[in-house]
Amino acid sequence: MTAVLFDLDGTLVDGSDLPLAVRGVAALIATHVPRLDPEDVVAANTAEWQELWPEVEDDWMLGTVPGEQLNERAWQGTLRRCGVRDDELVAMASAAFRELERQAVRLYPDVRPALAALRAAGCRLGLVTNGASVLQRDKLRALGLDGELDPVVVSSEIGARKPDRAVFDHAVLAAGLEPASTWFAGDNLWVDVLGAGRAGLHTVWVNRSGGRRPDGAPAPEVEVTSLMELPALLAQDPR
């Protein structure tokens, strides 16, 4: 059986509206602290993440820092940059962001028809994603993908992150798949294509923007701008 494993964010999930979630929380904060301009809160949040992310990225991806803890830490830092120290407001901002974040993410329009076509063609479908377990699995539930993909491998649950080939090896072994008959589709050349290729999987670059592959970047076996191209491409493949 041919298997297709997918990346989540940027491949199945469109997060382009996430900045709206930040703006929504900034507006909420400004109602409690009228002296603050929401745009200044947004700028403070951006600055906080720029400083915080390099410090916590590995821990978040590998599960040693829970996603909720990081969310609260980011809003606490944001408010402190604005001259505000208020634990209740931090908790309120964190909870509001979680809800607005759920509302902001959505599946790309081609996801459901592509998954249906691949499943009808006899393909097994799974997921390999970097991120905090609670956050990534919550997305799957909210978007109606929970239970539709098997295996589901989340970096923080196994202590390894893409492009480490161990993540892909884990997915293949846990699901009883064969690398030679398994494809991996993802939007990031250096994370998805590189890692999957090292593990012996066949690689698909999901290049939704249609931009040119950067010089020196890993080369995928297949490049698509829409997941709807996959069923026909895999049907033609002799593997």
Image: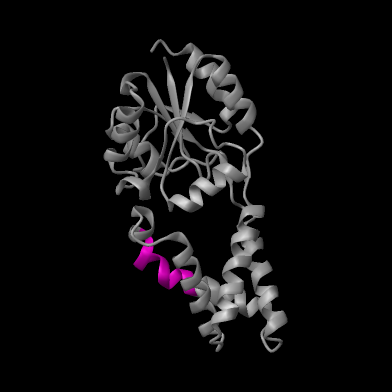
19 displayed left or right of 190? right
Main secondary structure along the magenta-highlighted residues: helix
- Looking at the image, can residue 209 be seen? no
Q: Residue at x 48, y 63 (%)?
A: 68
**The C terminus - image quarter:** top left
Q: Nearer the viewer, residue 207 or 24?
A: 24
- Where residue 198 appears, as percent x and y from the top left, is 27, 34
- Where residue 205 appears, as percent x and y from the top left, is 46, 34
Residue 152: quarter of image: top left
Residue 20: quarter of image: bottom right
- Looking at the image, can residue 103 be seen? yes
Q: Is residue 27 above or below residue 83?
A: above
Q: Is residue 190 above or below residue 66?
A: above
Q: Is residue 222 above or below residue 22?
A: above
Residue 214: quarter of image: top left
Q: Residue at x 60, y 64 (%)?
A: 97
So how many labels did they put on this image? 0
Q: Nearer the viewer, residue 193 or 78?
A: 78
Residues in magenta, as a range: 48-57
**The N terminus - image quarter:** top left
